[in-house]
Image (cartoon, rainbow, N blue to C red):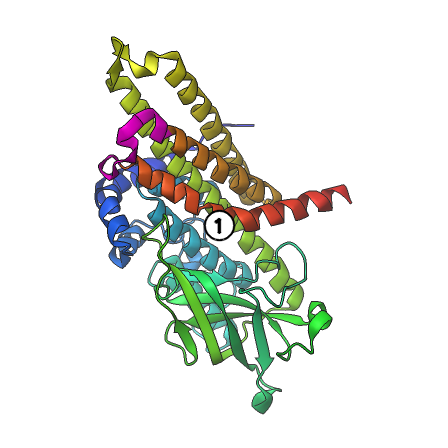
Amino acid sequence: MRFQLTEEQEMIRDAVRAFAEGNVAPGASKRDEEARFDRKLFGKLSELGLAGIPWPEKVGGAGGDFVAMTVAIEELARACGSTGAVLAAHHACCGALVRLSGGCGDDGNGGDANGELLRLVRQLAVGDKLGSWILPKFLPMQPRLSAADGTTWQVNWNEADEAGDSLVLNGGSDCVDLAGEADVYVVFAWQGKSGSQQGKKRRKKRWGVFAVEQGASGFGHGPPIRKLGLASFPQGPIRLDQCEQAALPASSSQIEEMARWTSALSDLGTAAVAVGIAQAAMDAAGNYAKTRKQFGKAIGQQQGISFKLADMAVKLDAARLLAYQAAWRADTGLPFAGEAAMACSYAVRAAQGITVEAVQVLGGYGYIREYGVERLMRDARCLQAEEGPGLIRLESWLRSRQE
């Protein structure tokens, strides 16, 4: 067992770190203040080959692996949590379509559904398009939905063309990653008549998956949510009203497996973002503790502060190892959903604790925006919204192991 990055992974880490320090970090505070998403920054990430790190070159990806993806997201989040979150959400969307296409097959020159799918995968993998995804939160853990849940999607067969492959999407979600900014949204939905009469029969309904592009008829989005943290990572409401779409070619069992895999990839991305934010807080607290003197010596040499720093370091390394383990399992073809959920849950909690302690180490300066640590604390706190679904998936995974 190797606890070491490969030479190629280290090169990716160094390249992304240099890019993040030169292009991402300088404007992070201003983007946070303005709650502004910078699409040009994503374009620069794409030019660096970061839009499709783990996907095969034949579909436009960089031909890397999931460990490299995790490292890249971590380094970006170290400079700006929102930028790391953007790349994580994009990879979850792209991963869903790559998983469905198998990463191979049609050469993309035909006009069939597989050719259209592969062309879309290529556009996402090279970064020509930005992607997001919408999934009922309960699907990854068990096949039941809450009708009152804001993320429940209802799909009605188009009665005028029921024999064809055209369907009408109706529904919405109040909090979708990159809402209004993404070009493509992978939508998972159950197929059946709308209305309360379906009730308990929803478990038996078939699932469908759709690639809905920005600007499609019936597609709408509201203004971005103003959040405590991750301010330049846009999230907001999406509504589909009589949005006619063709379902992507997949069986219900394939779609459920694909949804679980995509959720696991999302958990892994969230864990990487949390580790990057925690590392930034650790760096800030450590550097301050070396230079700030009290009672004749650096505060880092004072036992109270040194104990804090040691505890922060333990949590940070544990979170990183959990994330890398999940990524390694994904690379080797082993099941990684449980490990990704575990990494997400622990890393998010660790990031919250580490950033709070970093603020304490800086004392009064920790609450001043110019020092940047309070932004890290707010960003880490916002990741808790992602931890909830991850905990549900983790509980389901643990239960399945006991059966």
Label 1 sits on what residue type?
A: Ala
User: Most prominent secondary structure in the magenta stretch?
Assistant: helix
Instruction: Tell whether position 360 is magenta.
Output: yes
Magenta-colored span: 358-371
Identify the residue at the far right of this view: 403
Q: Residue at x 34, y 12 (%)?
A: 301
Label 1: element kind:
helix
Q: Residue at x 61, y 87 (%)?
A: 162
* Residue 104 locus on image (x, y percent): 51, 61
* Residue 339 locus on image (x, y percent): 59, 41
Disc tally is: 1
* Residue 10 locus on image (x, y percent): 38, 34
Q: Residues within 10 Å of mark 1 (few under 14, many from 20)?
A: few
Residue beneath disc 1: 385
Task: Give the left or right position of residue 170, taking residue 357 as reference.
Answer: right
Q: Quadrant of residue 138?
A: bottom right
